[in-house]
Amino acid sequence: MSVVERRSWWRTRAVLGTVLLWAFVLACVRLGFWQLDRLEQRRALNTRIARRLAALPLAGRALLEDTSAAHYRRVHVAGQYDDARAIVLPGRSYRGIPGVHLLTPLRLDGDAAVLVNRGWVASADAATIPLDWLPAVPPGQAPDATVSGLGLPLPLAPRGARPAADSAFRRVWYRLDLHALQRQFPYRILPVELQLLPAPDAPT
């Protein structure tokens, strides 16, 4: 390689290196603006959630009319628990003890129900609980239960992640999916989950 060719080769490398460096700098600047934009979006979402949490509780009739109004808002609703069709979310430990979250459909007026997350239950395998443990009705409540809970969106799994339809009732759900849940219940499941709030006189 001649001296002229060697100089041309080094000049080309220098130009390419400069271009790549500026491309990297511009990408970092763009990512910085994207992070700031995400931060503003998160702050706006937190503000909306805080306002919803501070709002007056939503009544059951309003829940049936507009489920999106219940997202991140306190909800008071009356119905009947369908304990025979309770499901669990596995792998929920509490203070190092394995357990599950118990979700029970609450039948409302008409052909509709809302899933109520009634909290953590100890489980040796962190996946199942004995069905005879489930109470027919919540302790201290009449068969027509009145529930106070925090409304959360019920997620939709990506199309490729949705399990095939199964005739057997599925008790353990690693990830909730509204469409998949609808296929195994004889009534309509509303697209909202209620995180049960403890009563003022509930024991720790």
Image: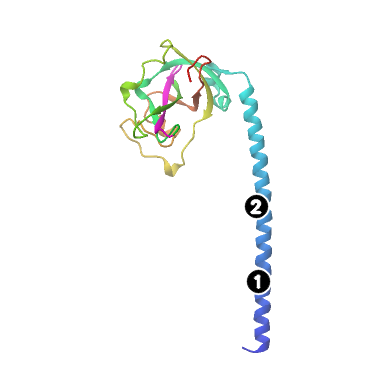
Image quadrant of residue 168? Answer: top left
Image quadrant of residue 43? Answer: top right
**On screen, residue 24 above or below 90:** below
Query: Outermost residue toward the front?
Result: 95
Give how far across and how far down residue 119 sits, in percent. 45, 26
Q: Tell whether 172 sits left or right of 50.
A: left
Residue 109 seen: no
Give how far across and how far down residue 74 sits, in percent. 56, 21
Element on which disc 1 rests: helix
Whole-number angstrom distance, CA of label 1 to CA of label 2: 22 Å
> Which amino acid lies under the numbered mark 1 shown in the image of this protein?
Leu
**Magenta residue check for 103:** yes
Query: Outermost residue toward the top?
Result: 142
Give how far across and how far down residue 88 sits, in percent. 39, 30
- In the rendered image, which quarter contains the N terminus? bottom right
Range drawn in magenta? 96-111
**On screen, residue 201 above or below 38:** above
Residue at the image position 49 percent from the left and 34 percent from the top: 155
Mark 1 — residue?
Answer: 16
Give how far across and how far down residue 120 sits, in percent. 43, 27
Number of numbered callouts drawn: 2
Q: Tell whether 2 sits left or right of 65.
A: right
Mark 2 — residue?
Answer: 31
| Structural crowding at the residue carrying mark 1, measured as other residues with C-alpha within 10 Å and reported as few (<14), some (14–19) or many (≥20) | few
> Which amino acid lies under the numbered mark 2 shown in the image of this protein?
Leu
Q: Tell whether 177 sits left or right of 53.
A: left
| Structural crowding at the residue carrying mark 2, measured as other residues with C-alpha within 10 Å and reported as few (<14), some (14–19) or many (≥20) | few
Residue at the image position 51 percent from the left and 14 percent from the top: 201
First reached walking from the N terminus: tag 1 or tag 2: 1
Element on which disc 2 rests: helix
**Magenta residue check for 37:** no
